[in-house]
Image (cartoon, rainbow, N blue to C red):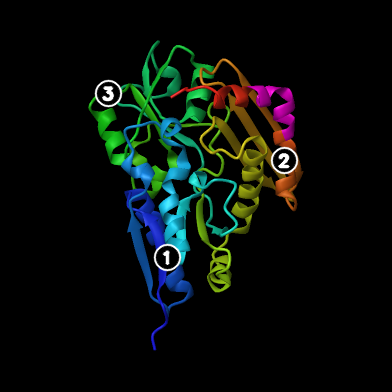
């Protein structure tokens, strides 16, 4: 009797399918006698590309259908860009593993200008990320940040057609799709701190599915897991909402973990930033401590103001 296949729930976008196929390949190598199948599906976030993420309900819209497939037994695991996965999961689901992190930085793409600092006054920059918007405007308040939705090919086409002077995308996604050659320059963290867990592939399963969880644990990359725990604890301490302009980035140095974080206003005029260091053995405590520090220095009032407004 053949073993039951491992079924992977995934979105249908090119990047999501690449990530799911990558995980499928790792699982086939890990359990060569067991079939692995993809279960592609269209999420609410994919169907509602006309509205900004802030208007449509945030990045959680990209995972609801995948989690429903887990709950109904139509899939055994779901593969996500971890930055899209809320930091507060329902008890029914668990983050079982993360893969080694790709480059977490943001990419600057332009047909006319070779660097962010070369953009002229009033340049049009495409991005639907409030995190990117607040940081870029903090450095360049003259810029016009305009909405940019759609899959990667659509965004690149809009740049090619001249709708924007530049656009900003994640380096990791471009690399995974074989599009690294489209990157004009990379934005370093002192200009644009990455999104929480940007560049990390996360694998989710049902909490009560111990056999799948044990198998997935063999794929887990420990250093990335440690960094992800710190960053997600920072986000959780600030709000738990992955659609707010919150950034965070953790690095391991020996036995220590260094974590940077920031929260900004939609217009970039206010930016509360900080960093902390602690033992890598206790990443969540570090994330919580930095969140508390940011909140006491003004992030609390800033986040309340943002959640009560409409900055789409």
Whichever of callouts 3 and 2 sits on the residue coming sooner in the sequence is: 3
The residue carrying mark 1 is: 75
Give residue 160's quadrant in the image: top left
Report if residue 25 lies within the magenta region. Answer: no
Q: Is residue 24 left or right of residue 211?
A: left
CA gap, disc 2 to disc 1? 33 Å
Please tell me how crowded label 1 is: few (under 14), some (14-19), or many (20+) other residues with Cα within 10 Å.
Answer: many
Q: Mark 2 vs mark 1: which is more N-terminal?
A: 1
- Span colored in magenta: 292-301
Q: Position of residue 259 (x, y in %)?
A: 67, 39
Using the numbered discs, state the Cα–Cα distance from disc 1 to disc 3 in whole angstroms. Answer: 40 Å
- Residue at point 74%, 26% (across, down): 296
Along the viewing direction, whichever of 268 and 106 lies nearer the viewer: 268
Q: Determine whether the residue tagged by mark 2 lies in a helix, strand or loop.
A: helix
Instruction: Check the image and report above or below for 69 versus 312.
Output: below
Q: Position of residue 45 (x, y in %)?
A: 38, 42
Mark in the foreground, 1 or 3: 1
| Residue behind mark 2 | 288
Is disc 3 surrounded by few (<14), some (14 to 19) or many (20+) residues within 10 Å? some
Residue 300 sits above or below residue 225 on the image: above
Whole-angstrom CA distance, mark 3 to mark 2, is: 41 Å
Describe residue 245's horizontal placement relative to residue 173 as left or right.
Answer: right
Looking at the image, do the residues carrying marks 3 and 2 touch, with CB atoms under 8 Å apart?
A: no
Q: Which residue is mark 3?
A: 163
Label the magenta part by its dominant secondary structure: helix
In the rendered view, would you say 241 is above or below 271? Answer: below
């Amino acid at each position: 009797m053949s073993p039951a296949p491992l079924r992977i729930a995934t979105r249908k976008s090119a990047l999501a399918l690449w990530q799911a196929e990558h995980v499928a390949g790792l699982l086939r190598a890990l359990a060569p006698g067991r079939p692995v199948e993809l279960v592609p599906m269209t999420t609410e976030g994919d169907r509602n590309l006309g509205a900004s993420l802030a208007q449509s309900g945030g990045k959680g819209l990209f995972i609801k259908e995948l989690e429903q497939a887990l709950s109904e037994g139509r899939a055994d695991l779901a593969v996500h860009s971890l930055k899209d996965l809320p930091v507060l999961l329902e008890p029914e689901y668990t983050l079982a593993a993360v893969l080694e992190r790709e480059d977490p930085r943001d990419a600057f793409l332009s047909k006319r200008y070779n660097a962010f600092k070369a953009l002229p006054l009033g340049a049009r920059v495409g991005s639907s990320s409030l995190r990117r918007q607040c940081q870029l405007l903090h450095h360049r308040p003259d810029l016009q940040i305009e909405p940019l939705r759609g899959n990667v090919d659509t965004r690149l086409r809009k740049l090619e057609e001249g709708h924007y002077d530049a656009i900003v995308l994640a380096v990791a996604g471009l690399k995974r799709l074989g599009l690294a050659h489209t990157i004009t320059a990379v934005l370093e963290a002192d200009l644009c701190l990455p999104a929480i867990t940007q560049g990390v592939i996360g694998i989710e399963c049902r909490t009560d599915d111990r056999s799948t969880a044990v198998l997935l644990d063999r794929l887990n990359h420990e250093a990335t897991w440690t960094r992800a725990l710190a960053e997600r604890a920072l986000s959780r301490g600030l709000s738990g909402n992955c659609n707010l302009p919150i950034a965070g980035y953790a690095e391991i140095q020996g036995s220590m973990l260094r974590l940077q974080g920031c929260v900004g206003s939609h217009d970039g005029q206010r930016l509360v930033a900080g960093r902390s260091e602690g033992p890598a053995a206790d990443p969540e405590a570090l994330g919580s401590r930095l969140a508390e520090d940011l909140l006491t220095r003004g992030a609390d009032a800033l986040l309340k103001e943002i959640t009560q407004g409409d900055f789409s």
